[in-house]
Image (cartoon, grey):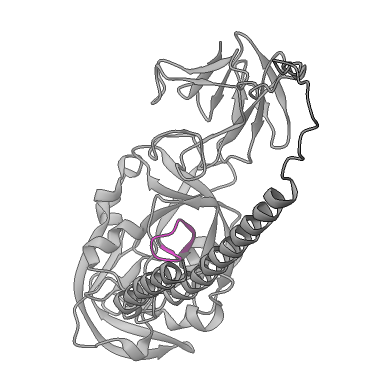
Amino acid sequence: MRKNIKKLFALMTALFLAAGILLWGETAKAASPTEAKDSVVCIGVGDAYGNLIGWGTGFAVGEPGEPIQYIVTNAHVAEPTDEDGNYIPCSLTVYFSAAANRSMMAEVYWCDQTADLAILKLPEETTEREALVLCPMEDVDMDDEFAALGYPATSMASDFVKFDTTDISITRGGISKQVRVSGRDCYLLDIQISQGNSGGPLVNSEGEVVGVNTFMLNDEARYAVAIDELIRDVSQDEVPYVLAGEQIPVLYFVIGGAALLVVVLVVVIVAVRSSKAKTGEAKAASVSAAPPTPPPGPWPETIPTPPADPVQKQAPPAPDARFVIVAGSASPLAGKSYPAGREQTIGRDGSRCDIVFPVETKGVSAKHCKISPAEEGIVLSDLGSTYGTFLANGTKVEPGQKRLLRLGDAFYLGGEDNRFEVR
């Protein structure tokens, strides 16, 4: 047994060390300006009545490979002002695809008017975009080729409602020099940018963000604010982002694996000792519990069978499956039915939901609502969704409310297309 434990320990140690050697040298980086398009969004600016009064560009930051919740843009996009410098009350909508009606309302999380930078926070995490890696000035190769990504007015015009990710423009060129403008670090660009590009990322050939396309001093001089202005003022603990060249935190994987290895080893040793102790107890019990010498006869010819145990062990009851919810004919889940005998979460995030809509489904949040079994039907609860959960008559189920639905009742997520009926 000891030899087997040593072999197990040696094998697990070798596996974790191999993983550490392979992963330790990985650094955070993108692949190209074209792939960086997967991180760019259009930001619609609406007036108090919901009418579009302008738009800008933004890009996602966060941990690579993880859902994102923060968008970087310009301060003059997030908090526009009039000619006198007065703030114009507005609403901000982050569009992933206006053509597919995929968008989220956003709020200003951080804003620096001097640097002309802002960070928007989405109401929930999303996988609609991927986080970009940030590259500070000290690591920028001035001889590299750079690209400005965004939604310039020339490509959008009056077709805003039709735009999609394919409408993101990539304009390539160079950086003339690093300069200081009005007390902020900037890049003078040899790249054509125009209205609508504001807030979009300026990336190097590796798809890493070096600056934020911002302003023009005249018809020819175009600038981008260096990403250092954001890095200096925003902590990675407040808003998650990754710098170019930073080690991907695989150290946690190695440490966690080593801890798991120790736990497994301790469990095995305890189990072995426990097994030995039980074996010793069993042997002792077998000696002490030896049957006594039977008294001299006469003995009965048969030994009566003891009465049966009146308490019979029963298997636990199966979940109550009297009710099911059936997706409507217009739903992406059309024709599918789901037993309602246990609590289930409904949404687009397959890692956190039991009933999962396609990620591109309109009106459905990552974790939208949940159903729970009840004696007379099911209980419906909203989980703070962006688009709302509604009863068949249009009544909104507010977060924290519990609504009892009986046989024949219906509800929908965001819109009538995402409908379920209780049967």
Report the magenta residues as a range.
Answer: 60-71
Q: Is residue 50 above or below residue 208?
A: above
State the residue in front, 52 or 316: 316
State the residue in front, 298 or 124: 298
**The image quarter in which residue 59 lies:** bottom left
Residue 269 colored magenta? no
Asked whether residue 124 appears in the rendered view, the answer is yes
Q: Where's residue 335, x and y in %?
A: 40, 16
Q: Is residue 308 left or right of residue 384?
A: right
Residue placed furthest toward the top: 408
| Residue at x-position 43% and y-position 59% | 66
Q: Where's residue 280, x and y in %?
A: 65, 59
| Residue at x-position 65% and y-position 61% | 277
Q: Where's residue 363, x and y in %?
A: 48, 34
Q: Is residue 325 left or right of residue 393?
A: left
**The image quarter in which residue 276 lies:** bottom right
The quadrant of the picture occupied by the C terminus is top right
Asked whether residue 92 appears in the rendered view, the answer is no
Q: Where's residue 347, x and y in %?
A: 50, 36
Residue 67 colored magenta? yes
| Residue at x-position 69% and y-position 37% | 399
